[in-house]
Amino acid sequence: MNLFKSLNQFLSKNTAWLVAVILVTGCASAPNQEPLIQRISPEELERIMPKQVPNLSLDEIVQLSQTKVPAEQIIQKIKDSQSQYDLSPTQLLDLSRKGVDAKVLDFIHQAHEQAIRDGFAEEINKREKAKLKEQEKLKREYQLRQQFYDPFWGYGPYPYGRYRPPFYGPNMFYRFGW
């Protein structure tokens, strides 16, 4: 009971100080900064996105499908020709209606998606390498600006740092007659 009474007296006398200390510590903390996110401009996005390279045209794919060539052979021909297609869902439906096998259409879609992922991964790697290169450059500049530090640099076997020639005054040294 006595403890609560003394605590109550302390708080009543020092409330203003406690509030001030709490406010000051709250103001002293650093504000949370959100991480800087580099956005991709439309020009960069256009550069990153895979380009459509139809070395094997869609008409040829339809023709192969109508002549009953197996889907695996058509997929192999697309791989061999290194063709890239950027097809809309409507174009995919039209190809399906014309008799192109679903496996071929799935491969075309998956190849396009993989090309997009590869393009973005390449861009991320390029940016990360540039960032690491910049950090290394800043680290080197910092190290060159910093003075050479060695706890024993500048101090020799002499008590006050560097060598001081002896004082040639009277009564300092005995000269043995020279």
Image (cartoon, helix red, strand yellow):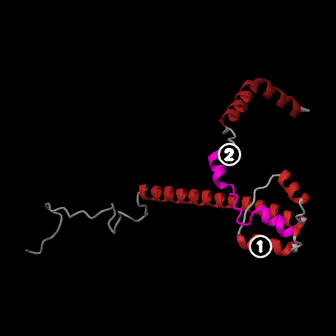
How packed is label 2: few (under 14 Cα within 10 Å), some, or many (20 or more)? Answer: few
Does residue 151 belong to the magenta stretch?
Answer: no
Tell me which numbered mark, 2 or 1, is placed earlier along the sequence: 2
Relative side of 34 to 142, left or right: right
Does residue 54 belong to the magenta stretch?
Answer: yes
Residue 58, picture quadrant = bottom right
Residue at 83% across / 75% down in the picture? 73
Whole-percent x and y of residue 99?
A: 90, 63
Against 80, is 19 above or below? above
Residue 92, picture quadrant = bottom right
Residue at 81% across / 71% down in the picture? 75
Tell me which segment is drawn in magenta.
Answer: 40-65
Q: Secondary structure at mark 1?
A: helix
Disc 2 versus disc 1: nearer the observer: 1
Give the labeled residue for mark 2. 35
Q: Nearer the viewer, residue 152 or 159?
A: 152
Alpha carbon of mark 2 to alpha carbon of mark 1: how far?
Answer: 46 Å
Give the labeled residue for mark 1. 77
Q: Secondary structure at mark 2?
A: loop
Residue at 81% across / 66% down in the picture? 61
Against 153, is 42 above or below? above
Q: Nearer the viewer, residue 120 or 113?
A: 113
Query: What amino acid type is highlighted by mark number 1?
Result: Lys
Relative side of 120 to 110, left or right: left
Residue 3, picture quadrant = top right
Query: What amino acid type is highlighted by mark number 2?
Result: Pro
